[in-house]
Image: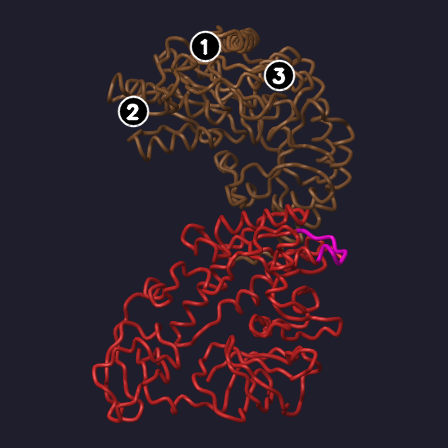
Chain colours: A red, B brown
Amino acid sequence: MRVLAAMSGGVDSAVAAARAVAAGHDVTGVHLALARNPQTYRTGARGCCTLEDSRDARRAADVIGIPFYVWDMADRFHEDVVDDFVAEYAAGRTPNPCLRCNEKIKFAAVLDRAVALGFDAVVTGHHARLGADGLLRRSVDLAKDQSYVLAVLTREQLDRSIFPLGDSTKAQVRTEAAERGLAVADKPDSHDICFIADGDTRGFLAGRLGEAPGDVVDASTGAVVGSHSGAYAYTVGQRRGLHLDRPAPDGRPRYVLSITPKTNTVTVGPAEALDVSDVHAVRPVWTGGVRPDAPVECEVQLRAHGDVVPATVALDGDRLHAELRRPVRGVAAGQAVVAYRPDPAGDVVLGSATITG
Amino acid sequence: MAYLDHAATTPMLDEALEAYVATAREVGNASSLHAAGRRARRRVEESRERVAAVLGARPSEVIFTGGGTESDNLAVKGIFWARRAARPDRRRVVSSAVEHHAVLDAVDWLAQHEGAEVGWLPVDAVGRLDPQALRAELDAHADQVAVVTAMWANNEVGTVQPVAELAAVAAEHGVPFHTDAIQAVGQVPVDFGASGVAALTVTGHKLGGPTGVGALLLARDVPATPLLHGGGQERDIRSGTLDTAGIVAFAVAVETAVKGQQEYAARVAALRDDLIERVRQAVPEVIYNGDPTDRLPGNAHFSFPGCEGDALLLLLDAQGIACSTGSACSAGVAQPSHVLLAMGADDDRARSSLRFTLGHTSTQADIDALIAALPAAVDRARRAAALRTPR
């Protein structure tokens, strides 16, 4: 096949591209330039959007022996990921920009362009398994598993995707990179949000959305217990940085229970008030077989690297409802609920949807 | 491989390569006083004379540099600094909108960091400068102008400028005129003395010499403040140990290219005209950019409506055809060409353009290969570009 390898400049995508070559594919490497101004994005070894990353990707492509180009996706990325990120926070939700980038950029804008240019598939260095059965499964390396941020992909997108790393641990990938002479073998993993240079999400949002002072309200009494400079800066389940004027009557810690953009209010309460047993979500995608008519017993994950809980998942048109077997704390609107079917050969992604409450 | 990117760099001529290797085997710093040094110096001075002879300059007007970008920076900044030092109110630079970045960014830097004012000369739809625009500019500001800089021929669209006319206007106003002739030497007749310019940039690797060596031809009466300070080589204007082997090979290449220019231009222009005709047949809606007549013989530049140049480049590259979209930034992200924008093209047309440049190793087979691959590439690139949803 003629395949396009998306190369971030990190070790995973470099090894994925090398494996695609070894598998006999005709591989072309592409680095996505996502920053409108590369200097403003994360610098150093942690990034995926800097000039240094572009150079690392180019060197990896040289070593692997494949053509290499840089595709300018900065405008698309800005509109579909960065602006969406800001708008979601402004609406009181907690977005996952990596998931959005997969959905809108890597497996949409890039994949569509690749197909139009005559490529059959896109290869990435995501840690997830996608075998001949077409099912998306967790990586063998559960600590690095990225099936959660890929669960949003549709059948059509998965059919044109290749994830060569799913059967390997991160340590194996690094060892292989060193054996292949790839200089990125020891490059540190990226963790933070790539377009927030200093990792200060609250400061980034304040710069975009401005100061918007409002009240912090206690859920049980309705009393104003503090103030904030922008409700958008809070996430459900958050405990730190609340700066409450008054301790709670029971003296126990307070957590963010909800954010109400309409009244610019942050509502706080005790930990147990965070417990959620019913998760409602919209825009379901179902790739783990035929879309079910009846409720499905499975496991769900409610945020990246979050706990997995048994649940009953039911689909109804554009809605998804998950009834959790045990309550989960801190379920944030805007995150994805991903349903998995436990499987010894790697838990299978059944589907996903965007949490509304 | 069909190499259609000779304007980026062209293969070294055999005689230049042989001269390089033979000289590089010899020890000797051209500034040393002993026999080895004298031998190196002799090679440098013979080379200086060869370059001067074929380009219509005096040997003392040839300053060897590390290539085109250095020569352009030395001319623009060096003449600006020297003339402003003589008269502090003389801090205006006149340049054109279609210069190479080696000039454009040097001028911008002077504006950003040295308080220079800049008069930008426009071009017409084929990228050509109007000497009357320069006359108007100098009539208004001649007293404040430190230097005028305008290229001899454009690296992207191939348009050859009316350099002698421009230089005459500058001379009338007593202002030194620098021209970046990197794309012109060996392609069109270039005579430093007869052209009336005060300074001229030439580089090796565009005409069959090595990369990293070039020259600034600088008239004796034109002052220039050095960029590099050190051992005082090259009239104290360009310090640094002379690259004897590079200079020897550069001189061989300049001499060969200039002496063979007419024959070369006739052969390459015929190939180029065939390329243009067949591209038009293969893709009828193509737009041919640049001056149709006053043009570099090896240059063909097109816009492919409905395509993105970088997609076409990728597709042709996969078929073994090397060409160029014009300009790229350090991250490799294609920017719309400032040259095409200055010519009045819109963003889409600028982004849809590709440059094919022929050179001394080009053959009919290169063009056959391009024409064989082009229609399918255009078709695919169009489908890819159609995905860009209007916003």
Find the distance from the CA under tag 2 to the CA under tag 3: 37 Å
Tell me where residue A342 appears, x and y as whole percent.
65, 84
The kind of residue tagged 3 is Ala
B34 over A275 or under it: above or below: above
The residue identified by callout 1 is B61
Q: Which chain carries label 3?
A: B
The residue identified by callout 2 is B91
Proximity of marks 1 and 2: CB atoms separated by less than 8 Å: no
The kind of residue tagged 2 is Arg
Tell me where residue B117 appears, x and y as whole percent.
31, 29
**Which mark sits nearer the N-terminus, 1 or 3?**
1
A53 over A103 or under it: above or below: above
**Which mark sits nearer the N-terminus, 1 or 2?**
1
Find the distance from the CA under tag 1 to the CA under tag 2: 25 Å
Tell me where residue A216 appears, x and y as whole percent.
27, 81
Q: Which image quarter: residue A121?
A: bottom right
Q: State left or right for residue B5 relative to residue B77.
A: right
Report the magenta residues as a range: A20-28
Tell me where residue A142 appears, x and y as whole percent.
59, 75
The residue identified by callout 3 is B253
Q: Mark 2 lies on which chain?
A: B
Q: State left or right for residue B208 relative to residue B72.
A: right
Badge 1 and badge 3 in a common chain: yes
Residue drawn at (35%, 19%) of the image: B225
| Helix, strand or loop under label 3 | helix
